[in-house]
Amino acid sequence: MMKRRLYLQVYMTIIGSLLIVVILSSLTWNLFGRDRMNPDMFEIVGNLTYLSLPSARATIAEQRAAVEELGHALKIDLTLFDEDRNLIGSSGKSSPSPEDTETVGRWQRTSAGRRWALHLPDGRWLTADLGQRANHRPLFGLVAFLCIVAIGVGVGAYPLVRRQMRRLEDLQRGVEKIGSGDLTARVDVQGRDEIASLAASFNNALSKIQKLVESHRMLLANASHELRTPLSRIRLGVEMLNEGEPDRRASLQQDIVELDELIDEILLMSRLDTVGQESLMDQVDLVALAAEEASRYPDCELRGMAEPVIGDARLLRRMIRNLLDNAYTHGALPVKVEIAQTSETVSMTVFDGGDGIADADCEKVFQPFYRGPGQQNVRGYGLGLALVQQIVKAHGGTVGILRKTELNSGIIVTLPVHPAQ
């Protein structure tokens, strides 16, 4: 079955609309315009014709001569009848006696169609046979004119319609390329209309999809690499394990715990990509969560107060825990947590006494599995801050690195008090 092209449908709609205009105009003219000339004009013509003829008291010869002269001057066939409708004289071919038919003023249109009869004030009748002039049809001229206009509009509209629809076809080809697996496909944005906006939205959505797919691909690649290290140690330890080496057994148990934590973080990152807003609508006491998590660490000070925020308590607890783990693992004591509130946001800053994060690494530390210089042998897998960023974004907030001061460095998280629906 042949595909119906959109540009042809739009183009045929324009042509169909023009044809409807032609038909309706023709019907309107046929019903209200045909032969509906101004009766006053007919009256004037009748009076002028009557004044051009001699009176009824004139001789037959005078009346005949006047009719012939008037007919030759107007180049139509004229016939004059007396009040009893008897022939007096004619110019050209004589017409039959007039009949009572349709009237326009004192003019009467005969059944022959092209003949008109004028009832003069003195009782005489004058008929006019228009001959070839009666073949002039205004309706045909009107229809021809409208058809020419329709053809002109149709010819001019085709390239415009085709140009607009071609951009939609480009979008279609872009979608088909995505379906075939080509995430690098993009559509040219032309103009500033709705189609251009649609193309820009398409490219923006495709860029996000490509970034998400590449992020997942990198995540899986790095995860598979990182998982080999504890698994290799476990495999080697099992081969060397015996009952007389309790330290070896404890080391293997620690490796298993690390592996379990890594898998848990990877699964959580995968779930955050599909988390729905309906699961982030609980009232959460951020201060209480921070107090509970800070109690698990030595020398951790908590200051500040704030109203509850809207979100997921489990995810926000994981965010606080990861921030504290990062401070204790990569920073130095003392560690402080400060919570503050404005009319629109609640902020939580985790300070530590370490060297801070270099400016060049401020964006990289939020990438999965990234480790800064000199951190390769430090416990962890580089997923903590990446998880923090995803959790904060899921709640409509922001996370950033504070510049290092003489006393401390820190990471600040800002969450909206009332997130957008």
Image (cartoon, rainbow, N blue to C red):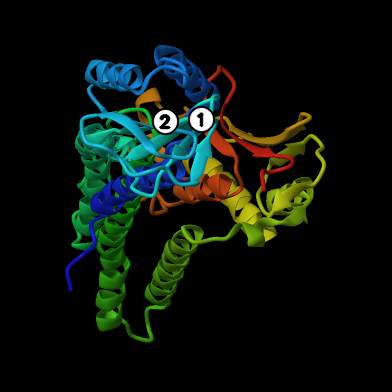
Rendered position, 395 above or below 59:
below
The residue identified by callout 1 is 401
Res. 362 mark? 2
Q: How busy is the neighbourhood of tag 2: few (under 14 within 10 Å), some, or many (20 plus)?
A: some
Q: Position of residue 41 (x, y in %)?
A: 49, 21
Tag 1 and tag 2, C-beta contact below 8 Å: yes
The residue lying at 38 percent from left, 86 percent from top is 243
Dot 1 falls on a residue whose secondary structure is: strand
Q: Is residue 68 left or right of residue 366?
A: left
Q: Nearer the viewer, residue 317 or 255?
A: 317
Q: Position of residue 147 (x, y in %)?
A: 26, 39
Q: Nearer the viewer, residue 230 or 157?
A: 157
Q: Position of residue 161 (x, y in %)?
A: 26, 40
Q: Is residue 297 left or right of residue 365?
A: right
Label 1 and label 2: CA atoms lie apart by 6 Å
Residue 377 visible here: no
Res. 353 mark? none
Marks 1 and 2, the one that precedes in the sequence: 2
